[in-house]
Amino acid sequence: MSDADTSTDPAEPVTGWGRTAPSVARVVRPRSYEEAAAAVRACGTRGGIARGLGRAYGDAAQNAGGAVLDMTSLARIRSVDADAGLVVCDAGVSLHRLMQVLLPLGWFVPVTPGTRYVTVGGAIGADIHGKNHHVSGSFGRHVRAFDLLTADGTIHTVAPGTDLFDATTGGMGLTGVILSATLQLLPVETSWMSVDTERAADLDDLMARLTADDHGYRYSVAWIDLLARGAATGRAVLTRGDHAPHDALPRRARRDPLAFRPGRLPPAPSFVPEGLLSRPAVGLFNELWYRKAPRHRTGELQRLSAFFHPLDGVPHWNRVYGRGGFVQYQFVVGHGREDTLRRIVRRIARRGCPSFLAVLKRFGEGDPGWLSFPMPGWTLALDIPAGLSGLGTFLDELDEEVADAGGRVYLAKDSRLRPDALRAMYPRLPDFLALRAELDPRSVFTSDLARRLSL
Amino acid sequence: MKDAFGAPQSLLVLGGTSEIALATARRLIARRTRTVWLAGRPSPELDAAAVSLRELRTGQDEVTVHTVPFDALDPAAHEETLGKVFAEGDVDMVLLAFGVLGDQGRDEAAPLDAVRVAQTNYTGAVSAGLTCANALRAQGHGALVVLSSVAAERTRRANFIYGSSKAGLDAFAQGLGDALHGSGVHVMIVRPGFVRTRMTARLAEAPMATTPEAVAHAIEQGLWRRSETVWVPGRLRLVMAAVRHLPRPLFRRLPL
């Protein structure tokens, strides 16, 4: 692709998964590393940003007036070492694709978020975490090396323990374009999960249960009913488990223990009227969801996709929030700051945010990425329709509580944080800015998120 | 950049002493706006407006307010002066708020005075509006908010010079909105009814009179809804839908 070609790429409206704040960019689809380098050189004054499958909720992979490098055509799995559990692949490969290829070989991705439809490049850029963070840390911890295309058009092989590695894991694509990566995989005997489910009557009960025996499970997560008030505030359903060993499977499943067959439902309709997710509707859903969960059940066998990625079964589920879209708010506060968590949960419950997706998780050790989100403590994530009146101010107030407690919000999900709040939340931000100023003085790599947060 | 709720971080006001514009700026500063450009004819009022906004600092954040010399009646200078603002960085929102009411009786007798109203409200807006629209289009994002008037919907005997200039502005903004559809730029037309300001101080108050603060609130709401047209108060939309269709002999006799 020549420079002249890139300038004729059509300008398209681009949004994140939450479908708020669209902006228009020239979308370039490089099919080789050379085309990616040419696209970076041809970015122009408004710069460029790499984009994967667009699962970041906010404006991280948007670049108004500039270039967006859609990396999903660079999707080759270059080599698999089935003995050591190492895979070398292009950045545009999705976790879904990795599972398809690697599960039959007895290997699983080391960290997966709530969707399989994220790319390896995006997973590194956001330093994603999963239900196993308390055991395995975030995605970056399992990356043995990656190739990074920087602003000068050169390619660097970056190893863990270097500044460039720590700036890029969680760096939201602002250090360069990740072209390929080497990942350490997790050995599994089957594609089934052995799952324990229990109910917690309120927030304190939930936190006590998570603290008491999270270490006994590789995966752990709690769904919270944020519309429940009074004594039931913070009531929850805990789901914890591990990969099922071969001998735990019934005979029929043992014939093909590593089969990967995620089901798929029809997609959400393209038009959904505003306000479908009203408070009473979500309240009813939450009530049923809580009642439906068993009080206590152990060793239930579930398919991988049902355990990790239930929403992936409904393509375009983000449409159910209607034209106005939605925001996801995810924050973490450290151990010892449970008071802040309790106060925020109470505030959300009192305000009645119609959120049917609210997830609490206990993080383990933090990760070295300078803008990495996880830190030891408690993280809560919730989806809220963007049209809820006064929501912007309300979330600003929550930001203050989070920052005062030494916590932070997750940039991969953010679409509304203010720059001063960011400075308070990420103490290594000055290091990140200094490295970026040296590596990319003309800000070739930029995004709507970077403009909004002065990154 | 605007955030998920459409709140801008930087704002350019054309007509920097407009009370509606300043009420809007105050409201937006309370949310996200940290940089404001007040464009207007250099005057003590313009400087005072800048000072009043600077004093609104929230938390640890400074509010940066600049003044820009801008004259609606000098369209030849618009590209240069406004170009300088856009060269400083992204402008998330442009509020086109300048305009004069004129004096209907005097203007009818002195056609050149009437022309001045038309040139300010319409010609000046065409030039400044297009200049900003082109810059916003290149940015790939931003909102252009145009202060029209309920008078644009149907001109009446008592102020048809002002009304016709606003009608021209309104039609221009509608077309501009269509031209920018899909460019990432959001054009929003605001049609307030009678607003209690300096401009209307000597007039008898019309029904459903409103305040600059109410207009500012409606603008903020319209930004996150990505509305194309906003009436203030909202029920004017219905009232004017009826008024627009009144037969002229009847309309003429109404005490409007």
Image: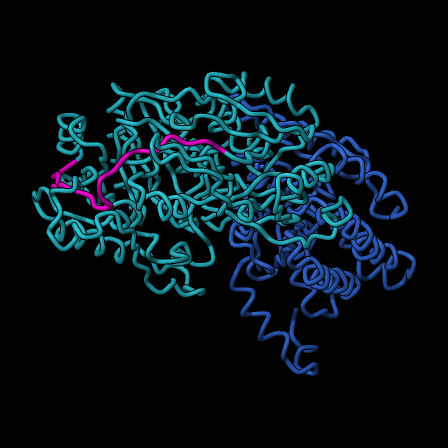
Chain colours: A cyan, B blue
Q: Is residue B98 left or right of residue A363?
A: right
Quadrant for the C terminus of chain A in the image: top right
Secondary structure mostly seen in the magenta stretch: strand
Quadrant for residue A262, please give it: bottom left
Q: Is residue B205 visible?
A: no
Quadrant for residue B174, please give it: bottom right
Taking depth in this image into account, of A357 and A419 the one nearest to the observer is A357
Relative to A434, say whether A411 is above or below.
below
From the top left corner, tell me how far across and down residue A111 is, in percent: 34, 35
Q: Is residue A189 magenta?
A: yes
The image shows a total of numbered marks equal to 0
Q: Is residue A192 visible?
A: yes
Q: Is residue B95 left or right of residue A75?
A: right
Q: Residue at x 52, y 60 (%)?
A: B234
Quadrant for residue B171, please give it: bottom right
From the top left corner, tell me how far across and down residue B110 is, in percent: 91, 60
Taking depth in this image into account, of B67 and A58 the one nearest to the observer is A58
From the top left corner, tell me how far across and down residue B194 is, in percent: 62, 57
Q: Is residue A84 left or right of residue A57?
A: left
Q: Is residue A24 magenta?
A: no
Q: Residue at x 67, y 37 (%)?
A: A37
Taking depth in this image into account, of A433 and B244 the one nearest to the observer is A433
Give the residues in magenta: A181-202
Q: Residue at x 15, y 47 (%)?
A: A301
From the top left corner, tell me how far across and down residue B43 is, in percent: 80, 33
Q: Is residue B121 left or right of residue A52?
A: right
Taking depth in this image into account, of A275 and A113 the one nearest to the observer is A113
Relative to A366, say whether B210 is above or below.
below
